Image (tube, rainbow, N blue to C red):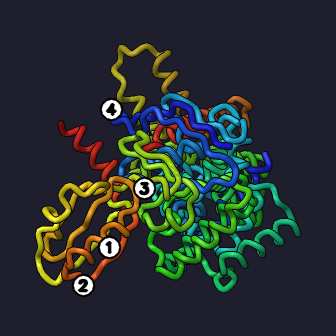
């Protein structure tokens, strides 16, 4: 279990991480979200023992990263932002170096290296120096380095950044497979990734948690959750039509396509009700579908709210 | 301890995986030859010793050693591998010492490859080989002192050129501390004790006696403490600067 307690980190006058507290349990894949500069990377750097916190603590399976760093670090596999690797080494040399540092020798080391290289399909570049590899391969070398010792805790800072869609998919699959009995913390800008691999998402902004829940819980917080989108043949005063109808929170007209409307729900599914109304009142419906809440809506709502508060 | 060895091996392998080690060794040998034979008048002196050879080392190291040291930590910061290295279950001390030792061994290899001049002087006359062994050791220890300064300067910046210039400047200061250039600059009223203290901190004071064949434990101790102090400073600087 990772326990983060009242973690704070200041850089000169700037507070990057502000009194952050949360736990992550075995089996959880935590998506760590937030705008640039929100404190995601800083938090990960503290958990992995690269930076010391200004206040508070991070504990990995009972080992405090500040007072027992070697024990804690041994449990962690970490892919730093940008997947840095020693460019002058070949993939195999680099992984052998990591294996030795992680305490594996001889056959055991070879077996593990062969295993993880197979998992991420690195065999073809085993004898190539890392600086000559493509971005996708470099990222995979970084990932291999992180999972080599089958760590209990896996911390990945933007693992799919700069990969093509196929590679992204591959890495996500890998994370899903790894996740079963581990703790995984993934930071990302790609919100669909959270829905695809994470069991829980935390959105942080200006070093504080602004949302925490399963992806579907967060999606449900979207104002567009259960909304219905309607495209008509022509403009119509839908707001007027729907006035007084229970369970409807409002109607938004599309700015470009004036005949498109989004009907917001107060929280319950309204698809059937609207469909019935549309038939009764004979709206010239061309398209009609229910919307799910998008993580993106929630992300923007919670992080922009915070910015507005700041500006006020 | 084990990790120190692993880091040491990786670093040393890194030098030989790139042209760096070879370029360094070749240039080191060529400049050594020029200094010894052209400037030092190795033959003209008509003496069977290696004084002209070792006498130029403080000046030769001034440019050669910082070139190796400049990348020690600056490159780790620039490429971000410092974050990888320091989040592995490795003590910072192991990393600092391992990297330093690798660079020191590289200078040691370059120094050992000057052995033909030793053979030459033995062929031409009957030198005191004890003095020569002491001088080689002294020269290597002095190279270590340059490297330790370089390690600390390299930790100060992510730009290795800046690290190079800083290292050359500080090394130069320590070289001239023991030489008349600096000592004559003190005004006459300066107490002799202070002048002696400054001279005692300089490289030349300690290297001169070693290269004359006096392997005084105090000179070895001086270089050892000097190296340890600058490596400790490196570790502190890395700890402070790694955040930005």
Q: Residue at x 62, y 49 (%)?
A: B87
Label for residue A65?
none
Check disc 2 and report its element: helix, strand or loop: strand
**Quadrant where the C terminus of chain A is found in the figure:** top left
Tag nearer the camera, 4 or 2: 2
Q: Earlier in the sequence, mark 2 or mark 3?
A: 3
**Marks 1 and 4: which is nearer the front?**
1
Note whether A66 is above or below A212 in the view shown: above
- Judging by the rendered image, the residue that carries numbered circle 2 is A286
Task: Quarter of the image for the N terminus of chain A: give it.
Answer: top right
Q: Disc 4 marks which residue?
A: A13
| Mark carried by residue A275 | 1
Residues behind callouts 1 and 4 on a single chain = yes
Q: Nearer the viewer, mark 2 or mark 3?
A: 2
Of marks 1 and 4, which one's residue comes earlier in the chain?
A: 4
Identify the image quadrant of residue A262. bottom left
Q: Categorize mark 3 by other alpha carbons within 10 Å: few (<14), some (14-19), many (20+).
A: some
Judging from the image, mark 4 belongs to the subunit labelled A
Q: Mark 4: which secondary structure?
A: loop
Mark 1 or 3, nearer chain start: 3
Does residue B146 appear in this view? yes
Query: x, y (%) of residue B172?
Result: 44, 43
The quadrant where residue A14 appears:
top left
**Label 1, label 3: how many angstroms apart (C-alpha)?**
21 Å
B161 or A245: nearer the viewer: A245
Residue A175, percent across and down? Answer: 62, 66
């Amino acid at each position: 279990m990772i326990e983060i307690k009242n973690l704070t980190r200041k850089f000169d006058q700037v507070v990057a991480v502000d009194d952050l507290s949360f736990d992550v349990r075995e089996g959880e894949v935590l998506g760590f979200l937030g705008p640039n500069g929100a404190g995601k990377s800083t938090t990960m750097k503290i958990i992995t023992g690269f930076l010391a916190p200004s206040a508070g603590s991070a504990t990995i399976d009972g080992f405090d990263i500040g007072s027992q760093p070697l024990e804690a670090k041994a449990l962690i596999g970490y892919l730093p932002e940008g997947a840095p690797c020693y460019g002058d080494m070949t993939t195999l040399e680099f992984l052998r170096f990591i294996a030795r540092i992680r305490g594996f020798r001889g056959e055991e080391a070879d077996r593990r290296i062969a295993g993880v290289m197979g998992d991420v399909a690195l065999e073809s570049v085993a004898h190539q120096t890392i600086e000559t590899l493509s971005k996708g391969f470099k990222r995979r070398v970084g990932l291999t380095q992180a999972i080599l010792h089958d760590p209990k805790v896996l911390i990945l800072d933007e693992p799919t950044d700069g990969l093509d869609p196929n590679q992204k998919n591959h890495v996500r699959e890998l994370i899903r497979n790894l996740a079963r009995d581990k703790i995984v913390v993934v930071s990302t800008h790609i919100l669909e990734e959270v829905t695809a691999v994470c069991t829980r998402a935390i959105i942080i902004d200006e070093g504080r948690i602004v949302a925490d829940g399963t992806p579907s819980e967060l999606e449900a917080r979207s104002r567009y959750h259960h909304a219905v989108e309607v495209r008509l043949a022509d403009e119509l005063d839908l707001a007027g039509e729907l006035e007084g109808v229970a369970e409807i929170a409002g109607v938004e007209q599309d700015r470009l396509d004036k005949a498109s409307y989004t009907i917001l729900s107060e929280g319950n599914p309204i698809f059937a009700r609207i469909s019935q109304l549309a038939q009764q009142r004979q709206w010239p419906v061309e398209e009609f579908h229910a919307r799910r809440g998008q993580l993106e809506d929630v992300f923007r709502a919670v992080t922009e709210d915070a910015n507005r508060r700041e500006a006020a | 301890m084990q990790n120190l060895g692993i880091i040491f091996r990786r670093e040393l392998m890194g030098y030989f995986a790139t042209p760096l080690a070879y370029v360094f060794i070749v240039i080191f040998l060529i400049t050594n030859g020029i200094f010894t034979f052209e400037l030092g008048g190795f033959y003209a002196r008509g003496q069977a010793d290696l004084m002209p050879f070792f006498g130029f080392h403080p000046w030769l190291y001034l440019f050669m050693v910082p070139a190796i040291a400049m990348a020690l930590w600056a490159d780790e910061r620039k490429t971000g591998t410092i974050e990888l290295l320091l989040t592995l279950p490795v003590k910072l001390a192991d990393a600092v010492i391992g990297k330093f030792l690798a660079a020191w061994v590289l200078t040691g290899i370059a120094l050992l490859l000057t052995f033909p001049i030793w053979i030459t002087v033995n062929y031409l006359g009957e030198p005191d080989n004890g003095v020569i062994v002491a001088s080689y050791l002294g020269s290597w220890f002095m190279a270590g002192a340059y490297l330790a300064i370089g390690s600390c300067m390299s930790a100060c910046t992510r730009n290795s050129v800046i690290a190079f210039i800083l290292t050359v400047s500080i090394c130069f200061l320590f070289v001239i501390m023991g030489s008349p250039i600096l000592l004559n600059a003190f005004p006459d009223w300066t107490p002799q004790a202070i002048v002696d203290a400054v001279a005692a901190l300089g490289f030349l004071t300690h290297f001169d006696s070693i290269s004359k064949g006096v392997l005084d434990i105090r000179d070895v101790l001086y270089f050892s403490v000097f190296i340890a102090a600058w490596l400790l400073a490196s570790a502190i600087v890395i700890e402070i600067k790694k955040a930005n």
